[in-house]
Amino acid sequence: MIDPFDRKISYLRVSVTDRCDFRCVYCMAEDMNFLPKAELLTLEELDRVCSAFIRLGVRKLRLTGGEPLVRRNIMSLFRGLGRHLKSGELDELTLTTNGSQLARYADELAECGVRRVNVSVDTLEPGKFAEITRRGRLETVLDGLAAAKRAGLQVKINTVALRGVNEDELEDMVGWAGTEGHDIVIIEVMPMGDIGGETRVDQYLPLSLVRSRLQRRWTLDETDYHTGGPARYVTVRETGRKLGFITPLTHNFCESCNRVRLTCTGTLYMCLGQEDAADLRTPMRQSEGDEALEAAIHEAIARKPKGHDFIIDRRHQRPAVGRHMSVTGG
Ligand code: SAM
Ligand code: SF4
């Protein structure tokens, strides 16, 4: 699959549910309306559409959400998709999780062939953790991280930089991740979905500032390490671990974009920051064979836009993209 800008599409991210057991302040409103269950692709349909993408050239698959591990029987999907790792058609099966269910599932994920997980942790202070996530407990997530380590999973920590909330902790978190043997990625708040009272202008903390503060404590060595994704990586000399920065608002990462995103209802977004999308559920349900589905995928890739246009400033208080991150999958 090659898009109009000559980018090879080899990475699919799938939001397997829009539901979550947390309500992180930058991601969701307190009282979210979730999709009716009937709208969702079944686990069998998710397997079918992922398998079609793999046939067409996807080498890396990430399950996300919402919280992927709260979807009932989700392990059957991991187990099923693991067959593509065994056959060599897929290089990597990963997930992004808030870690709340990781203690329970870490071993099983490893058995399914998962080697790496991204776990979101924005603070190491229990009270602040409860405030940011509105429902989460830090201790449960730390137990999950310990279980992941025991199961041999490599962990990458995702931390959203929030002005006035965790900005004073980021230096310590880099040290903590190093001690635990985890890479860490710091993410700038993106303007996605209405989140109720707060505005993103209040939450927004530019990573250029974060980076210069981190440099007071840590030596950040440039690397040419790249995942094809939006993160730019440095190595923290003192810990030897990688530190990534995702700066969608201050940098453009689109030219090397190799990914597309599928929602839990079977809508394919060719760009995280654009509204254009393709319905894959209808062609999939139209017939038992996959010809119509594959044609719809090819047609969608041919429309992948050049890039996004996120903006957060005082004149643009509304989200640039109406849907929440939990719909498209972060
Ligand atoms: N529930 C899982 C988790 O939290 O890791 C997976 C889904 S979550 C939407 C994926 C990632 O997106 C998380 O690291 C989260 O912090 C990040 N995220 C959510 N909303 C965001 C926003 N508006 N701006 C930047 N990052 C966001
Ligand atoms: Fe849930 Fe992840 Fe969104 Fe937090 S960031 S509310 S854990 S989907």
Image (tube, rainbow, N blue to C red):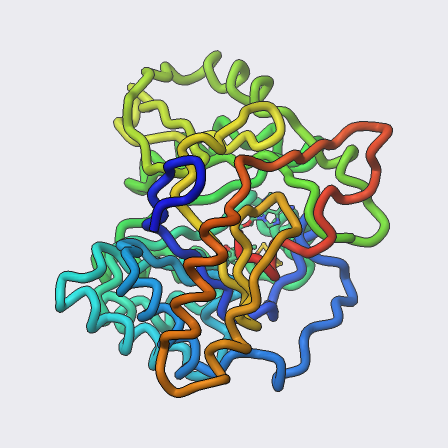
Q: Residue at x 47, y 30 (%)?
A: 245
Relative horizontal placement of residue 116, taking residue 246 as reference (left or right): left
Residue 155 image offset from top left, x and y in percent: 33, 49
Q: Nearer the viewer, residue 211 or 64?
A: 64
Relative horizontal placement of residue 238, taking residue 23 as reference (left or right): left
Using the image, determine if residue 297 lies above or below residue 161. Answer: below
Residue 204 image offset from top left, x and y in percent: 70, 32
Quarter of the view holding residue 22: bottom right
- Residue found farthest to the left: 87
Residue 203 image offset from top left, x and y in percent: 72, 36
Relative horizontal placement of residue 227, taking residue 121 as reference (left or right): left
Using the image, determine if residue 280 lies above or below residue 64. Answer: below
Using the image, determine if residue 285 lies above or below residue 214. Answer: below
Q: Residue at x 24, y 59 (%)?
A: 150
Relative horizontal placement of residue 198, taking residue 224 as reference (left or right): right
- Tell me if I can see residue 282 in this picture: yes
Quarter of the view holding residue 89: bottom left
Q: Residue at x 60, y 68 (%)?
A: 18
Q: Nearer the viewer, residue 101 or 41?
A: 41
